[in-house]
Amino acid sequence: MHHAPPPPPPPPPSSSGDLPLFPASEKNQSINWHPSSLANPPASRIEDNSKETGGTWGDGCSAATSLADNQDETTLCSSLARHFRTNIDTTHTDIVLIICGFVSGLVDGLSFNAWGSFASMQTGNSVFIALGVSGQPAYPAYLWAKSLIALTVFITSNILFIHVSRVLGPRRRSTLILSFAVQTAALLAAAILVQLGVINPKPEDPRAPIEWMQVLPISLLSFQAGGQIVASRVLGIDEIPTVVLTTLLCDLLVDPKLTEKVNPKRNRRVGAFLALFLGAMTAGGLSKVTEMAASLWFAFGLKFLITAGWFVWKREGRREGKRDVEG
């Protein structure tokens, strides 16, 4: 007679207590420890999680969109900052300086004809100051004082523009924009003073008492002239000083390559001389047919166009048809 085998012993108690390791309902269920089961959880759980975190997914999309917008703004700002920090290409900047020479002709033609003093050409002012030591000329009185003020402002302007350019970067786009914007503002202020009648719009009577208000436009015009000549040095085109012709003519005639077919320096000097000469002629012609302020408005318009041009001027290292390369 066969006896039934004894029942299996109960599972040992768990270390945490007397409870079995698994619930009774799962005693007879096999447990799948395959790694794929861990990497791919049941679909029902994924669906449940998606339902529970639906709002989180929405917030995530909004955050991603916001991040993209911020990146676009950052990219735009960095591109603009890089654009203004780059040095400009000095190719063809001689054209800008020749235009500045024309502005000097306009300004000095008006200043000397109306107020008996130069704004840009400080050689003439220095002669007037020297003559003033001996009380000459007798008329207009105190001509030396106006010339002294113009020369002092011109020297101060040179010092200021030189040091600011060195601190900010001489050929940096933003530096040139700032320099010419200040020059443009000085011309604008002088034009407004004359246009509004703060300064007598008629040429000065040499025998009349000096009008000290004339010192205001003379100082403004001398200040912007200082910025011009500093720009010519910053751009490395010394043959176009923009405010004086004496050394320019000498350098032109002493050039051993004067008659050669290709000579950029000769061409620049000739262009600068003609520009200043034509500027002074234009100032004289405008004074006959229109108000005194017309020359100042004309000069202001030219300087404004130059200032705007620096915003889009080609940067250093850029080559047409090739990939941009930083200089």
Image: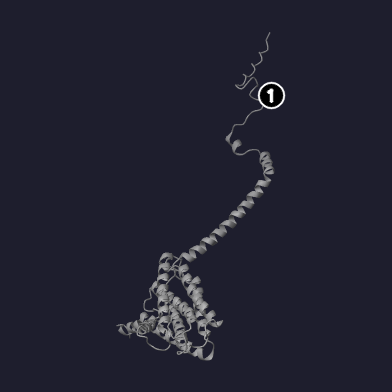
Please state if 64 lies on the left or on the right of 210 as rendered: right
- Give the percent coordinates (x, y) of residue 156: 41, 73
Between residue 219 and residue 260, name the one nearer to us.
219
- Give the percent coordinates (x, y) of residue 210: 46, 85
Q: Quadrant of the C terminus?
A: bottom left
- Residue appearing at x 39%, y 74% in the figure: 155
Colour mapping: one colour
Residue 261 visible to the viewer: no
**Secondary structure type for disc 1:** helix
How many numbered discs sit on the rendered protein? 1
Please state if 13 lies on the left or on the right of 242 as rendered: right
Please state if 152 lies on the left or on the right of 76 as rendered: left
**Which quadrant would residue 248 be assigned to in this image?**
bottom left
- Give the percent coordinates (x, y) of residue 129: 37, 82
Between residue 24 and residue 278, name the one nearer to us.
278
Q: Amino acid at mark 1?
A: Ala
Between residue 27 and residue 304, name the one nearer to us.
304
- Residue appearing at x 48%, y 70% in the figure: 178
Q: Quadrant of the N terminus?
A: top right
| Label 1 crowd bin: few (<14), some (14–19), many (20+), radius 10 Å | few
**Which quadrant would residue 279 be assigned to in this image?**
bottom left
Between residue 8 and residue 111, name the one nearer to us.
111
Residue reaching furthest top? 1
In the depicted structure, whether residue 251 falls above or below residue 26: below
Q: What residue is shown with label 1?
A: 24
Residue 246 visible to the viewer: yes
- Give the percent coordinates (x, y) of residue 152: 40, 76
